[in-house]
Image (cartoon, rainbow, N blue to C red):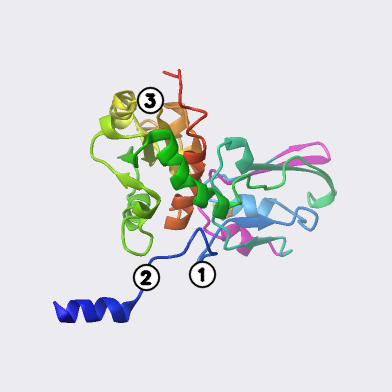
Amino acid sequence: MFKILQKAISTGIVTTAYPSKPVKISEHFRGRPSFDFEKWQDARPAEDVCPTGAISFCDDGDSRKVTVDYGLCVFCGLCAEASADQAVRITQEFELATADRRNLVLTAEYTLNADGTHRRLRALHRDFSNPAADVERVGQTAREKIQKLLGRSLAIREVDAGSCNGCELEIIALNNPIYDIERFGIHFVASPRHADMLLVTGPVTRNMEFALLKTYRAMPEPRLVVAVGACGISGGIFGANYASLGAVDKVLPVDVYIPGCPPRPQALLQGILLAVGRLRETRYDERP
Ligand code: SF4
């Protein structure tokens, strides 16, 4: 017993201070790709290598409309490698959760040279902006809000609707001493009847559609739905096919989307805290 205490004292506190303090990230971590649309001379090489279709474009005469969808992006970094003009680079940004799917889509319009390269950026319809970037404030108020609205802890039921289990590994990490999600008064439960939030991973496979709907309908209101990872947001690398319906929001109303492949634990934490912030809005939810 003495040895255990000695070990605990010498180890000190291992729990991350995030979101109260910024998180220290490994230099090898790949976050969202950032696009310098002014500098970008050609979207074609990046579109060519993008494995999920997160980068796409449509040419019309001498103009091109380029779309970047972070809901499809798996943060592989291939677009940055393929862009010789250095206009695309991989960042370490992971706080990407948003309540509005449209926030994850950027579009840029270019006029073209005869060889198909970009001559001039004509319009940038949406630059990336994260409405939930103030994670510290969200974190500080989350526990208070949970207590005020629910009068108890927030309970999460997780459903794997067809994932590769990458997201599950990160979700499991939320319960370890480093990320310790219970410090916010949030815990995972086995039954949807005890759950306030449904965390859904994977593209929704046709075999899991009914089970997912049943789980959602078994939850008491107010109930929140969080789509986790590129697969949950858009179907990811699998998309919609004979076995998969794709995005979670094709089956259920989604409150918050958490991009990543898989999203790291802090990204999950940010998305969950963001969803807690929406609890009041959905309290008298009349959706099916
Ligand atoms: S980082 Fe994202 S946008 Fe770039 S190639 Fe990979 S999936 Fe496509």
The disc, 3 or 1, on the residue closer to the chain's N-terminal end is: 1
Q: How many marks?
A: 3
Q: Establish if 233 lies above or below 45.
A: above
Distance CA(mark 3)–CA(mark 1): 37 Å
Element assignment for label 3: loop
Residue 104 screen position, x and y as percent = 60, 42
Q: Along the horizontal axis of the image, is 243 left or right of 260?
A: left
Q: Residues within 10 Å of mark 1 (few under 14, many from 20)?
A: few
**66 part of magenta stretch:** yes
Tell me which numbered mark, 1 or 2, is placed earlier along the sequence: 2
Residue sitting at 58 percent across and 59 percent down?
Answer: 93
Q: Would you say residue 116 sits in the magenta stretch?
A: no
- Circle 1 residue: 24
Q: Which residue is mark 3?
A: 221
Q: Which residues are magenta?
A: 58-84
Q: Is mark 3 within 8 Å of ligand 1?
A: no
Q: Position of residue 114 (x, y in %)?
A: 85, 48
Q: Viewer-proximal residue, 120 or 286?
A: 286
Q: Residue at x 26, y 76 (%)?
A: 8
Q: Using the image, determine if residue 47 lies above or below residue 198.
A: below
Amino acid type, mark 3: Glu
